[in-house]
Image (cartoon, helix red, strand yellow):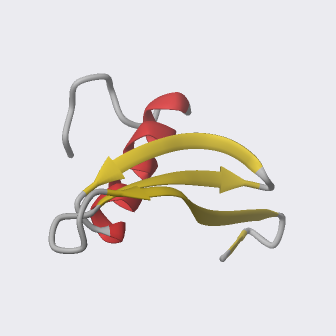
Amino acid sequence: MEQDGKETLEYIVKDRRGPDHAPIYVIEARINSNVVGVGEGSSKHDAEQAAAKEALRLFGILKEGKEE
């Protein structure tokens, strides 16, 4: 996904563990190949959202402890 024509955001699956009926995914959010967040969840979507929230906290957009 291109942002402002300069930055590239991508999500990379780093790990999948657990049984098929209850997997746990670990996903990295990267901007221009730099890791800006890591998230874990029971679906890829949940792990991506967790990684995105961590990235927003890193950039000061989301305050620590808020779940907006």
Going by the picture, which residue comes out furthest to the top? 64
* Image x and y of residue 22, in percent: 17, 65
Residue shown at the point (74%, 65%) measured from the top left = 8
Q: Is residue 19 above or below residue 51?
A: below
* Image x and y of residue 38, in percent: 49, 42
Residue shown at the point (19%, 40%) measured from the top left = 67
Q: Quadrant of the N terminus?
A: bottom right
Q: In this view, does 22 lie above or below 67?
A: below
**Residue 35, located in which quarter of the rendered image?**
top right
* Image x and y of residue 10, in percent: 64, 66
Residue 61 shown left or right of residue 10 in the figure? left
Q: Is residue 33 above or below residue 37?
A: below
Residue shown at the point (57%, 53%) measured from the top left = 29
* Image x and y of residue 60, in percent: 48, 29
Going by the picture, which residue comes out furthest to the front? 19
Residue 1 shown left or right of residue 58 in the figure? right
Residue 2 shown left or right of residue 42 in the figure? right
**Residue 32, located in which quarter of the rendered image?**
bottom right
Residue 45 shown left or right of residue 52 in the figure? left
Residue shown at the point (83%, 64%) measured from the top left = 6
Q: Nearer the viewer, residue 29 or 21?
A: 21
Q: Which of 11 and 65 is in front in this view?
A: 11
**Residue 59, located in which quarter of the rendered image?**
top right
Figure label count:
0
